[in-house]
Image (cartoon, rainbow, N blue to C red):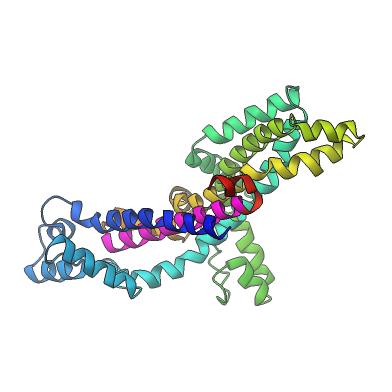
């Protein structure tokens, strides 16, 4: 097991090195002088010099890269060109909103995708199976922004059941303890604020959950169909085990192994891929922060958020790989 873990950790090193090079190169790939391009033709020489110093554009590329690594080693992601605040502080301020949204969306996807996948497998090639397969195909194929607009139109505007933007209503102000709005409302015993935060969570989390639930359902169905044809399943049936016990005690336990990888990687993608959803719903998270930075050409913020998303994806992928190895001895032997 130690050898397996060491091999996975070593494999992350070149990926991390490549990510650092790409993030470092973002501002330097702009044709001409990046400082002049970012500030525009009306910038003074002092403003250009200050921005060049902030972006560490002086000296050769290796010298700049060394300075960038030293800056990262001290936890410094630079200063936002728009707000003038440290990028780290602004990321930490918005990160709980994105994590809260991603966790709720993942929970919804698990509660919907896995049972439907098992149900579809248990009724393979029956009308129920065909309907569920069409639904999962629609969930995979429909763009997130289209689902978001439909939900906003139906549940927000037509029915008026749920809010269509923001994280809290303007009149609901609760003390921030953890940064998670629902949890903060419960911890401060402000149940009205917790309820309001939960209502704001529903629509964006459903949009994020739709794709993952559809993918999970398809993978679980396919995996369960394969598992249910194994010899040990036939042996369990020959011993007189009920179909329910065969399905859940023997089939589901092994059929869910691929779902571990799917859930882990898609959770990491949610953190980085929530840009569109957060923008449509005006959700004050990292995704919308990055969208605003791209629109404002705020390169320190773009570099910082890109590095954050890449690191989260690498760490989650490593954790999923290790967990898969723990659950499946065959993976460790191959590793």
Q: Is residue 135 magenta?
A: no
Q: Is residue 275 left or right of residue 20?
A: right
Residue 153 position, x and y percent, is: 55, 42
Q: Quadrant of the N terminus?
A: bottom right
Q: Could you tell me what secondary structure mostly forms the magenta stretch? A: helix
> How many labels were placed on the picture?
0
Q: Nearer the viewer, residue 44 or 237?
A: 237
Q: Is residue 155 left or right of residue 313?
A: right
The quarter of the picture where residue 52 lies is bottom left
Asked if residue 309 can be seen in this view, the reply is no
The quarter of the picture where residue 218 lies is top right
Residue 261 lies, with reference to residue 200, above or below; the image says above
Q: Nearer the viewer, residue 253 or 185?
A: 253
Of all residues, the one furthest to the left in this rendering is 45
Q: Is residue 324 magenta?
A: yes
Q: Is residue 254 left or right of residue 202?
A: right
Q: Is residue 29 left or right of residue 265?
A: left
The quarter of the picture where residue 252 lies is top right
Of all residues, the one furthest to the right in this rendering is 240
Residue 101 lies, with reference to residue 211, above or below; the image says below
Residue under the point 37% across and 53% down:
15
Residue 328 position, x and y percent, is: 64, 48
Residue under the point 60% across and 50% down:
324
Residue 18 lies, with reference to residue 216, above or below; the image says below
Residue 2 position, x and y percent, is: 55, 60
Residue under the point 69% across and 24% down:
130
Q: Nearer the viewer, residue 316 or 94?
A: 316
Residue range in magenta is 298-325
Asked if residue 68 can be seen in this view, the reply is yes
Q: Nearer the viewer, residue 290 or 6?
A: 6
Residue 86 position, x and y percent, is: 33, 73
């Amino acid at each position: 097991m130690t050898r397996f873990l060491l091999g996975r950790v070593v494999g992350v090193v070149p990926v991390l090195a490549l990510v650092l090079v790409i993030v470092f190169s973002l501002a330097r790939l702009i044709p001409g002088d990046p400082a002049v391009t970012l500030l525009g033709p009306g910038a003074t020489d002092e403003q250009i010099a200050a921005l060049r110093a902030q972006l560490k554009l002086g000296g050769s590329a290796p010298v700049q890269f060394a300075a960038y690594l030293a800056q990262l080693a001290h936890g410094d992601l630079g200063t936002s060109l728009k707000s003038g605040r440290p990028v780290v502080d602004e990321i930490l301020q918005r990160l709980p909103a994105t994590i809260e949204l991603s966790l709720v969306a993942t929970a919804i996807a698990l509660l919907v995708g896995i049972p439907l996948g098992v149900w579809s497998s248990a009724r393979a090639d029956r009308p129920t199976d065909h309907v569920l397969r069409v639904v999962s195909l629609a969930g995979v194929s429909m763009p997130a922004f289209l689902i978001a607009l439909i939900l906003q139109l139906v549940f927000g505007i037509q029915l008026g059941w749920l809010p269509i933007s923001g994280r809290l209503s303007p009149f609901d102000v609760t003390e921030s303890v953890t940064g998670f709005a629902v949890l903060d409302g419960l911890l401060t015993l402000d149940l009205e604020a917790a309820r309001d935060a939960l209502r704001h969570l529903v629509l964006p989390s459903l949009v994020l959950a739709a794709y993952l639930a559809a993918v999970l359902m398809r993978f679980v169905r396919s995996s369960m169909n394969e598992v249910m044809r194994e010899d040990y399943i036939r042996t369990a049936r020959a011993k007189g085990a009920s179909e329910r016990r065969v399905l859940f005690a023997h089939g589901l336990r092994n059929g869910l192994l691929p779902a571990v990888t799917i859930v882990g990687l898609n959770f990491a993608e949610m953190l980085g891929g929530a840009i569109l959803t957060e923008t449509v719903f005006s959700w004050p998270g990292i995704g919308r922060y990055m969208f605003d930075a791209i629109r404002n050409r705020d390169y320190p913020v773009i570099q910082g958020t890109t590095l954050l998303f890449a690191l989260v994806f690498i760490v989650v992928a490593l954790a999923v790989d290790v967990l898969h190895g723990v659950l499946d001895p065959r993976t460790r032997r191959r590793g």
